Image: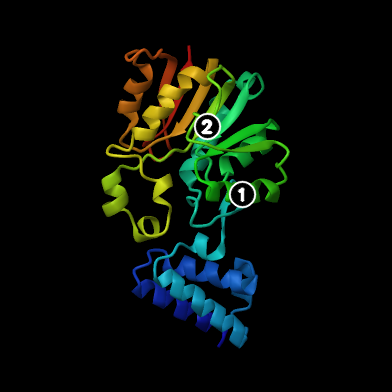
Amino acid sequence: MRLIDALHNGSELLKDAGVEEFELDARLLLENVLNKSRSQLFLARDLKLTDSQVSQYQAFIERRQQREPVAYILGQQEFWSLSFSVSPHVLIPRPETEFLLDQVLSHANKTNFTRGKIVDLCCGSGVIATVLAKETGQDVVAVDISSDALLVSKQNIYRHNVQDQVQLVQGDLLSSFQKINQFSLVVSNPPYVNHIDVTNNLAPEVSDYEPHLALDGGVRGLELIKSIREQLEDVLLPGGELFMEIGADQGQELLLMFTSTTNGLDGFLTVEILKDYAGRDRVVHAIKA
């Protein structure tokens, strides 16, 4: 079978299966099988594939027909122009989290990179911790409740040679740490999707394959965020900052949550909701008084 014929057949099968970006996905899978770039694939359109290559490509297409994400099939995902290992134990890194990191690096008080500890909370695959370590040159604590997720994080910090900068901690949010002011910067992509959406309204690639532990934030998607808000009281330094990825419909509730002084909580000095490039609420930025 010629390369061009295999690519066409794969695209048609994915299209019939309801895959939205069927041509792109068919090409990415074939690039991986042949270890070729996009331009190399185009130039080799008449190349005759071996039986082994055809079999591997067909197996990949069959998995994608079942709506398994390409990132899980290939075991990797590009993020921040770097390649990261992923598995069904972690969320696939998304552009929204790149936006979160953009905001941290452009808006954070630079003294908060050095005067206390930096934390990647709910670290998953460790992409945030890895990027922060590389971009700031500082040490980062990466926290997740899932031991399986931390194994993926470990792969990635070694893959990008930041293992001497990133400390992995298994724990339930910030509860593993002493109640002393020690953190100057907390960055988090917590579970923030409401339970009904997780179980009923997400694409099959997400609902059937990505870990619900990393998605489900409870009835309104705010349960873990409320816990983080409460725990920050005891561990964040005065003037310390939080940058957290949020849902597009959660901005106003979180603005109130972080400015409120009820239930014995101190209000944050500055709280702002940063909108993404599509104009949607995407990041809450809070500075402790």
Q: Is residue 35 above or below residue 54?
A: above
How many neighbours does mark 1 have within 10 angstroms: few (below 14), some (14-19), or many (20 or more)?
A: few
Q: Position of residue 108 (x, y in %)?
A: 56, 24
Foreground pick, 179 / 63: 179
Q: How many numbered tags mark residues here?
A: 2
Foreground pick, 250 / 40: 250
Q: Quadrant of the N terminus?
A: bottom right
Give the image quarter of residue 74: bottom right
Residue type at mark 2 is Val
Residue 177 placement, left or right of 258 = right
Q: Which mark is residue 81?
A: 1
Foreground pick, 19 / 127: 127
Residue 168 placement, left or right of 210 = right
Q: Is residue 289 above or below residue 75?
A: above
- How far apart are the two marked residues, 1 and 2, measured between alpha carbons? 20 Å
Disc 2 target residue: 187
Give the image quarter of residue 34: bottom right
**N-term-proximal mark, 1 vs 2:** 1
Q: Position of residue 107 (x, y in %)?
A: 54, 25
Residue at x 67% of width, y 22% of height:
114
Residue type at mark 1 is Ser
Q: Is residue 62 above or below residue 247?
A: below
Residue at x 56% of width, y 83% of height:
54
State which mark lies toward you, 1 or 2: 2
